[in-house]
Image: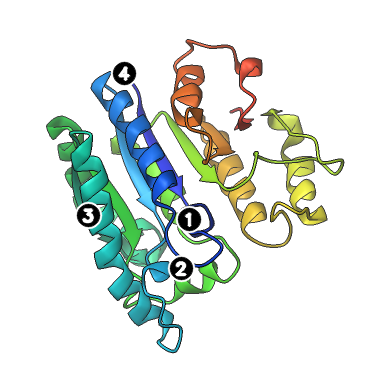
Amino acid sequence: MGRYVIKSGSGLLTKKDGRRDLDVIKSISFQISRLMEMGHSFVYVSSGAVAGDPKKNRTKNLRSMVGQVSLMSEYKKVFSDVGIEIAQLLVSESDLSGFLYILKKFFTIGPTLVEKVILESFEERVLVVVNFNDGTNDSQIKALNRCADNDHTSMSIALMDKLEIDGVITLVDAPGVLDNGGKLVKLVGKGEYNRTVEYANGGSEFGHGKNGMETKIKKNINVAKHGKLAAIINGRDPSSIEEIVSVFEGCALLDSFDKGTIFLP
């Protein structure tokens, strides 16, 4: 059975009026629970903390701290309803990349602490819900302003070698990546990486443009370059997660998937 990183962004988890979309959260939980029952393991990277505090007069740092409490409360309820135990993991830049991370990797024999707790969660069948520690770091707060929060987080975790992650699934509030004519790009091979980034530069009504979709495409391409499958899929579809895992596992044909964009190694 496979190991996957699933990432959902603020735009998917939040309604137009600023409230969290509980229907989407429940749909995600139902699909993950069914796949975990089959033996698959997941790390779930979730944005949406800032949206949990509607008091916009506050800094986004404080709003993220207030909202993180309610976000985890909601996740605990919906996942408990489907029999899944969850755990919270807040990470910082030094846990994922940069100079301090390189030092940790250099002086650590075996898995880093982040890798150790995630590996333990796989063994214990616990779903780790990851978010960036926005209360004391501005990098993902700034990314939120361009709809790209936690894309770096999900990619970094996927590329931690001791975790042996098989693929990355990025859930978005869109059909997937669209070309300049508005048509869904179903498969992206090595020779199409640069052109696919240009589709984001062109912009679209679905939020493509010089913002989060461009970042998502680049991060998914980077994952694919490391030999792993990656996909940007419609997070509002009630079966998209299960279907893409079936494709990743070789149980369904690549070109049969029409609920998002798959990036090939």
The type of residue carrying mark 1 is His
Tell me the CA gap for discs 3 and 2.
17 Å
Q: Tell me which numbered mark, 3 or 2, is placed earlier along the sequence.
A: 3
Residues marked 1 and 2 touching at CB (< 8 Å) = yes
Q: Tell me which numbered mark, 1 or 4, is placed earlier along the sequence.
A: 4
Q: Tell me which numbered mark, 4 or 2, is placed earlier along the sequence.
A: 4
Q: Disc 1 designates what residue?
A: 152
Q: With 214 as the anchor, is 129 left or right in this view?
A: left
At x 79% / y 49%, what residue is drawn? 198
Q: Tell me which numbered mark, 3 or 4, is placed earlier along the sequence.
A: 4
The type of residue carrying mark 4 is Met
At x 44% / y 54%, what residue is drawn? 21
Tell me the CA gap for discs 3 and 4.
23 Å
Considering the numbered disc 1 on the image, is that residue within a helix, a strand or a loop? helix
22, 223: nearer the viewer: 22
Q: Is residue 252 above or below residue 81?
A: above
Find residue 119 and report its image quarter: top left
Mark 3 against mark 4, which lies toward the viewer? 3
Tell me the CA gap for discs 1 and 4.
25 Å
Q: Disc 2 designates what residue?
A: 140
Q: Disc 3 designates what residue?
A: 88
Q: Disc 4 designates what residue?
A: 1
The type of residue carrying mark 2 is Gln
Q: Which disc number belongs to residue 56?
A: none
Tell me the CA gap for discs 4 and 2.
32 Å
Where residue 259 appears, x then y in whole percent? 61, 30
Quarter of the image for the C terminus: give it.
top right
Residue count near mark 1 (Cα–Cα under 10 Å), binned few <14, some 14–19, many ≥20: many
